[in-house]
Image (tube, rainbow, N blue to C red):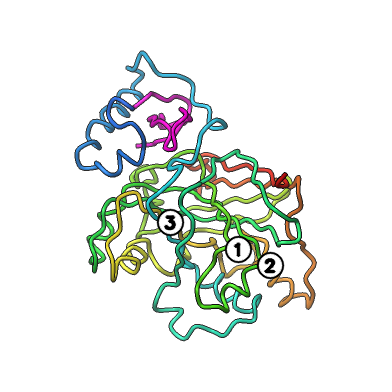
Amino acid sequence: MKFATLPNGTLDGRLVVVSKDLTKAVDATVIAPNLLSAVQNWQEKSADLQALYDLLNAGKVDFSFDFEPSVCLAPLPRSPQWLDASAFTNHGKLMEQAFNTKPIPDFDTIPVMYQGASDDFQGPTADIVMPNEEDGIDFEGEFGVITGPVPMAVTLDEAAQAICLLVQINDWSLRTFGPREMATGFGFLQAKPSSSFAPVAVTPDELGDAWKNGRVNMHLNVTWNGERFGEPHGSEMNFSFPQLIAHAARTRKLSAGCVIGSGTVSNKSRDAGSACIAERRVIEKIDLGEIKTQYMRFGDTVRMQAKFDDGRDGPFGVIEQKVIANK
């Protein structure tokens, strides 16, 4: 199934079911008023949502309408919890060099994760308001999952069953604040503005063979101001999403609607490019001896779209946003 959220004057928006080809949508509020409600009641609502999705794809819904991704909110405009990992250890190790931090001894065996703001997720085309160009404005392309309820000390099998939906994320960062906040040991705060989401959340079966081993096996194509930046592949994720869920729930339960991010998609091959500026900068420092790429300026745009290995567009739609100044 595919879902999106349209504005309706409420904090959570209204739920629509989107056709497989992303051209049509149908209001689903008679089943669940919003996506958060649907996920919170997944066992009761998913069958009815599936039936509506099947009817929409068969052209048997008289009250469908053209789907306009540009007017969508984030699939979940707000969530009970947003937990972001660094599951691509290639990226994490490069960031250690970028920020001159001490290596984490068990980085390869225990996931790294922080808890971020979950009350103001941004839609796929929203202008992104930033306070200052000198804060090191950076994009970060990721994949993520939305969970149902997860009990404490969940097993990996139970964690896999808790995955309701997959999403595509731009986890904005302000790099100037990162080193100090990491050094405090308390985690990110000012360094992490609200994250953005592609318009469509999908059930894992929509990926077919590209959903494998608890990972999104797709390229994430990123362009900055219209120029190619990278297309790293999600298969190199060192920790699977079930592993990330189990890690997050080791000492506490997770509420339905929790969003867990993969961290920046990153590949060992330099040919894949990058999904964030900080990674390109540290690669330049390593390979060229100097940093050439600067961070984003007001008026800059970033575009992200997942692609299947055969080149087909992915199911999430497109994130395309401009950075603007806070006034």
Residue that badge 2 annotates = 176
Residue that badge 3 annotates = 82
In the image, what residue type sits under mark 3? Trp
Q: Position of residue 200 (x, y in %)?
A: 45, 39
In the image, what residue type sits under mark 1? Ala
- Look at 70% across and 53% down and name the residue there: 131
Secondary-structure class at tag 1: loop
Compare marks 1 and 2 and give the one earlier in the sequence: 2
* Left or right: where 75 falls relative to 298: left
Give how far apart the Cα atoms at labels 1 and 3 are: 15 Å
Is residue 123 something that shows in the picture? yes
Q: Quadrant of the N terminus?
A: top left
Where residue 247 is drawn, which disc sits there?
A: none
Q: Which residues are magenta?
A: 1-28
Is residue 273 something that shows in the picture? no
Callout 3 touching callout 2 (CB < 8 Å): no
Among the 4 quarters of the image, the one containing residue 160: bottom left
Compare marks 3 and 2 and give the one earlier in the sequence: 3
Q: Position of residue 132 (x, y in %)?
A: 73, 56
Residue 270 lies in the magenta stretch: no
- Look at 46% across and 49% down and name the residue there: 119
Q: Quadrant of the C terminus?
A: top right
